[in-house]
Image (cartoon, grey):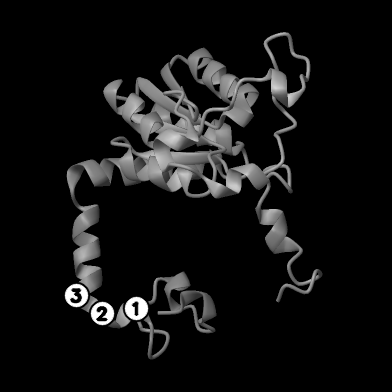
Amino acid sequence: MHCAECLVQNCQVQCKQPGGADCPMKDQALFDAILAEYQKPDIHTFYEASVESMRQSFARLTRLMETINFCRLMKYHTIGIAYCSGMLREGRIVNALFKKEGFETVSAGCKVGGFSSEELIGPCPMRESLPERRDLRSPDGRLHPPEKVKPRAICDPIGQAMVLNEANTEFNVVVGLCVGHDSLFLQYANAPCTVLVAKDRMLNHNPVADLYTAEARGLL
């Protein structure tokens, strides 16, 4: 099933004719089951709100404001914010903006629990070869030598999800979690989630730039 390699793209114009031998639309039973899922009351309400939010936001609102608009259409009250500790400033801004828009918020940073790497993954041979983080800052905002800084806690995405689950959040916003950590958070979170920021340290958190320049850089 290779939609990305299909040269026909029948489905783009509401055509149910399969576009090729490996087109998934050949399986009518599968798409009958898919249609039935959209008829479930909770799913129908959620999807209808997402379509309406897209209509209202298209080429008008940023991703952040579209997310706020969607939450308003769904009449949510409690929003969870799961952020990377390396994006604490951004997490605080997202939290403040949702509160300003009238929502209650519950936030969980990725170091919640304060676990060491030994507690979660055991002895790590890689750890000794990794360079010291250059962004370790004390409360006074100054950069201190590594030996004067307490060992950093390890990321705890399951903890983030369970903290927000305990607070009964209705919708969660992910801000810059690491690859894999975001997957675990999404797996364990009870509420629906959206990713506001996809972390990319090399591209100022704009991973799509890698795609736009792939041909020029000889990646394809």
- Cα distance between the residues tagged 2 and 1: 6 Å
State the image coordinates of residue 181 (x, y, percent, origin top left). Answer: 47, 43
- At label 1, the amino acid type is Pro
Q: Earlier in the sequence, mark 1 or mark 3?
A: 1
Question: Where is mark 2, residue-wise?
Answer: 27
Q: Is residue 146 above or below residue 99?
A: below
Marks 3/2 in contact by CB < 8 Å: the verdict is: yes
Question: x%, y% of residue 137?
Answer: 71, 19
Eyeballing the image, is 17 above or below 130? below
Q: Nearer the viewer, residue 168 or 34?
A: 168
| Residue at (24, 54) in percent of width and height | 38
Side of 72 where 142 appears, left or right: right
CA distance separating discs 1 and 3:
11 Å
Q: Secondary structure at mark 2?
A: loop
Which x, y percent locates residue 80? 41, 26
* Residue 24: assigned label: 1
Residue situated furthest bottom in the rendering: 21
Disc 1 crowd, CA 10 A, few/some/many (<14, 14-19, 20+): some
The circle on residue 29 is: 3
Name the residue nearer the viewer: 135 or 126. Answer: 126
Closer to the camera, 6 or 41? 6
Q: Residues within 10 Å of mark 3 (few under 14, many from 20)?
A: few
Residue most extreme to the top: 140
